Amino acid sequence: MNSANPVTYLTSSYSPWTVFASVLIAMFASYVALDLAKRVRQSDRVLARGWLVGGSMVMGTGIWAMHFVGMLAFKLPLVVGYDYLVTGISWVAAVGVSGVALWVASGDQLTRTRWVGGAMAMGLGICAMHYTGMHAMAMSPGIVWDWLLVGASAVIATVASAVALGIFFWLRERTGLSAFGWQVAASVVMGVAISGMHYTGMAAANFPSDSVCMSWDKLGGNDLGLLVGTVSVVLMVISLFSSVLDTRMHGREQKLSASLAAANQELQLSTSADPLTQLPNRLAFEDRLDGAVIRSQQEQTRVGILFIDLDGFKPVNSSYGHAAGDAVLREVALRLKRVARVTDMVARVGADEFLMMLDGHPDRASAAQVAQRIRDTLREPLEVDGHEIALSCSIGIVLFPEHGPRGKLIANADAAMNAAKRAGGSGHCFFEPYMDASSPEQIDLQRDLRAAIARNELELFFQPKINGKSGQITGVEALLRWRHPARGMISPGVFIPLAERFGIIGALGNWVIEDACRQIRAWLDSGMRLRVAINLSVHQLRQNDLDKRVKDALARHRVDPHLVTFEITESVAMEDTESSMRAFERLSAIGVQLSIDDFGTGYSSLAYLRKLPARQLKIDRSFVMDLEQSEDARSIVEAVVRLAHALDLRVVAEGVETAGQRDILQGMECDELQGFLFAKPMPAKSITLWAMGDEQDAVGRAATGSEAVSFSDSMFEVDRNEPYEPTEPMPIGGTKGDK
């Protein structure tokens, strides 16, 4: 080629609308590519590979279609065709570069090496597709290339690929409408970049004026462009529809997974929470306790546990129904949560049993204060379905590490709670070693207790009951004592819980009934007629042959049934009202007197109270002790006295210790009084001497029984003119404490 004959080139032109169509196809192909990039990251490997293969074909066809639609826009003054084989190879190159793009986009992260390598591979693939497609024209003489522009097109292809990969990774973490908007914008950028590479490459091609297309009779230019464009758009639409369908299915799958996760969470919550009160259950409480104990050991601090049991809850269900009982429990849960601090935990572990964990290094004083706040809070009346309900509670307290290892903390708190309940309820009690029935000492003690009856180690003490008007003795209450040969006098608070745990309580109860009848006969033979009150435990009340045992003991000792009173605590009487009613009726048929003990500490239904064949109510000492300081206590006691008299019942006040209390009770016309103000419990011989007027000898004999006795001149005679009513007996173990 010389200057005399310069090379001339064919004049080319472009159809603007077809160019625009090619750019739109490039953008659409880019959008589909971005959408497919999300599909190839499926966790299912087979499905991910399917999307990779299918996506590569659809995406590659889209890019390839853009090229040929662009070629359709290119006009030369000659007929143009394309070689079949070379055209097919260009399509393969387009599919291959799409596969590389999707494979790189499927990675967990875009490292620099992966990014650069992927961009270069894609750039070369795009160039290969484009220039192979150009070669399919089979021009003669060949196309004259402007290599500067060829290089520029390669750079554009590589940079566009790098940008596309970055967009792939950036967009796949986006969701919702924001992600859609960014995907459209990214598709526009990528479509323009791909089109820019194509038309830069076309600008690099120069066709000599004598050029002839050797493949003019092969794939026709116009027909090929229309066919490729139509098929590619159809393919991409189908792919996009499949992608949208997959997205919806994936969305439903995510919703299903979220629903399943929520169901799992609810199931886990149901296994760790009480469904009625929504408080944690025992499982959750013990899990939290484990962590608190470990932290306590590391930091050398304490953890406290309060075992809370409602007194007299069962009658609420029997009187008002279970719906009312459930409402009461929910209200109790709310009140306990209000008492608890942020670091504390409250749980429901039984029908009417709750646990509270005190964190933050509590001592005995602070634990007792919390227990008192709980008692005060629960004592406030609550209203359910128009009924005012008053409750109390018994609380057992343990402190870690003083009161046992982690595995025994709750059991020990339960034992302490039972001790508080046996003491009359409406109180709290710290755990003591004797409450642990599994200790070697307790095993030895219960063995000795079984033999105590045969060894004559048991003894009844008696505490007088005084007429509120005359000051004369109306009777006595029998209190059980155990003189152990090695340990000395053992408190009923120690051996009565032991008897209940090891099944000895029935034998002890029978012994008390038998010995009380024997003592009554001894007094009768000496010319002294005293009424004796005996407390019945819940275990005795449930004995089917209790009435027969009582009847046999009375007959054996020739004792008038009216000389015996059986006292049953209010909480025991109302625990199973139907069973209590049957037991009361059988005992009443014998002729013995019946009394409701500790009245006011539990929950009594007046309907049942009227039906019970009781002749007496005993006001709990917790009300009596506050008479001089509390207007509320005076109002309660006065209301009980009036209620009892309206029901033709006599009233006994226990725990009278001051003259002021006595005067207030006498002013309220309380029928009988009992307490340390008049006399402490004493052996039978001391009672006999006392009644006979030998005060000094009675004092001496009482002292030998480790009891001090105070006397009043008005008590030396037995009041024989009073209507025959029972006096206040102590529970057989004396667990309430002497009056």
Image (cartoon, helix red, strand yellow):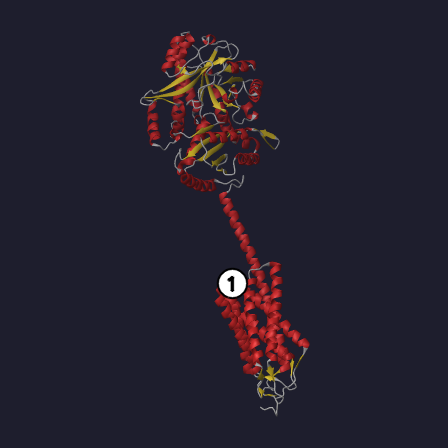
**Could you say whether the residue bearing mark 1 is in a helix, strand or loop?**
loop
User: Would residue 285 be seen by someone viewing this image from the given angle?
Assistant: yes
Where 76 falls versus 163 (above or below)?
below
Left or right of 511, for residue 229: right
Q: For residue 54, what is the image quadrant?
A: bottom right
List the single residue furthest toward the bottom: 4
User: Would residue 557 be seen by someone viewing this image from the given angle?
Assistant: no
Left or right of 444, for residue 657: right
Neighbour tally class for label 1: few under 14, some 14-19, many 20 plus, Cα within 10 Å: some
Residue 681 percent across, percent down from the top left = 42, 16
Q: Which residue is mark 1?
A: 42
Where 623 falls versus 102 (above or below)?
above
Where 315 falls versus 228 (above or below)?
above
Q: Nearer the viewer, residue 556 or 434?
A: 434
Q: Nearer the viewer, residue 54 or 162?
A: 162
Residue 285 percent across, percent down from the top left = 47, 40
The quadrant the N terminus occupies is: bottom right
Q: For residue 330, what is the image quadrant?
A: top right
Q: Residue at x 48, y 33 (%)?
A: 308
The kind of residue tagged 1 is Gln
Q: Report the number of numbered marks.
A: 1
Residue 691 percent across, percent down from the top left = 43, 9
Residue 715 percent across, percent down from the top left = 46, 9
Q: Nearer the viewer, residue 313 or 82?
A: 82
Left or right of 579, for residue 486: left
Where 67 falls versus 256 (above or below)?
below
List the single residue furthest toward the front: 3
Q: Nearer the viewer, residue 345 or 27?
A: 27
